[in-house]
Amino acid sequence: MKRHCRLVLNGKPIEARAGESLIDAALGGSILIPHDCRSGQCQSCRVTVVSGAVDDGGSGHGRTVLACQAAVAGDAEIEFEELPLPMKRAGAVTEINELSPEIAEVVLTTSAPLEFRPGQYVRVKFSGYPAREFSPTFRLDGSFKQVELVFHIRRLPDGTVSGQLGKAIRPGHAAHVQGPFGQAYLRQGQGPLVLVAGGAGWAPIWALARSARSTQRNREMVVVAGSRDADNLYMLPSLQWLIDDGGRIYLADQARAPIALPAPARAGGYGLRRRPRWSRRGREEQGALGQCAMLRRSFPAKLSNLIADGQDHPSMAKPRAALSPRSLS
Ligand code: FES
């Protein structure tokens, strides 16, 4: 094996030493391969070996390897998805809308667009308050504007920041945004997307789902949404958008589904039982809306293909995998 090798990373040639990890080799050439744990766990550093060879370190899957585990073993050409670099933007609050008794939609208008991948998060500092991290998302009707950042923020009774929304923090309040950060973003791929969210965690999932329906239309997608109680099912308009667009939706039943979503406030929760026919791909699932008092009260009649019981879907067998970034790839 020669000691000095030539790597081409997304078309950029660099010199690399045999034996060093692909991440380190790339950094030596001032190229950042997106990564997180560096221990082979998070899968965020998976890259494609287009030509040549690397020592995959046991991480090979098809033509892909984990850049934190694979080592330079010769000349090779590597491709990976590049992420937008973190930037800073000044802006101001332009809207605060009540989505539910606990969750507010906060819209910031920034001086220039901030590029991010759906699912990433940014650091927001409302002037005079400590910074907090939130995921930008779409409006619940699926719309967006280039210079707007939309956040879903849960109000905490004693929250230093969230407790001031609509009080000291009102439209016109100055804010600074830094980002994007995070590895749980929408990746290219063919496999089914399983997106799970509860409460204000709907923000990044809605961003992922909405974006996937625009850019990866042939990809099967299952969305599981939940809430602590019916009053906080604020995501219903966006679920309706997904259903209208052909998406398949589950309303999570914490009492039965083995996923870590907030427990329904009332015993019985979303007790709807109808076995979805997941084996028939492409067939529209029909939820039995109206059999549960909570659902009947909460949902508009036209929300007819929402499945309110996640127990039967195979993805539920591995809840951790369903929530990991890789499952979003
Ligand atoms: S950084 Fe390589 S698997 Fe996490």
Image: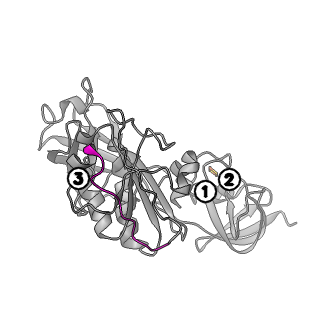
Left/right placement of residue 9 relative to residue 223 reads right
Q: Check disc 1: other Cα within 10 Å, few if <14, some if 14-19, many if 20+.
A: many
Q: Residues within 10 Å of mark 2 (few under 14, many from 20)?
A: many
For mark 1, give the secondary structure.
Answer: loop
The response on whether ligand 1 sits within 8 Å of label 2 is yes
Label 1 beta carbon less than 8 Å to ligand 1: yes
> Is 254 left, or right, of 25 in this rendering?
left
Give the amino acid type for the residue marked by disc 1 in the picture: Cys
Residue 101, by quadrant, is: top left
Residue that badge 2 annotates: 68
Q: Find numbered disc 2 in the image and state the secondary structure of the residue it sits on.
A: loop
- The amino acid beneath tag 3 is Phe
Foreground label between 2 and 3: 3
Q: Which residues are magenta?
A: 281-293
- Residue 45, numbered label: 1
**Image vertical order of residue 133 relative to residue 50, above or below:** above
Q: CA distance from mark 1 to mark 2?
A: 7 Å
Callout 3 crowding tier (Cα within 10 Å): few <14, some 14–19, many ≥20? some
Which amino acid is tagged 2?
Cys
**Helix, strand or loop: magenta stretch:** loop
Residue that protrudes farthest toward the front in the picture: 291
- The residue at 49%/49% (across/down) is 311
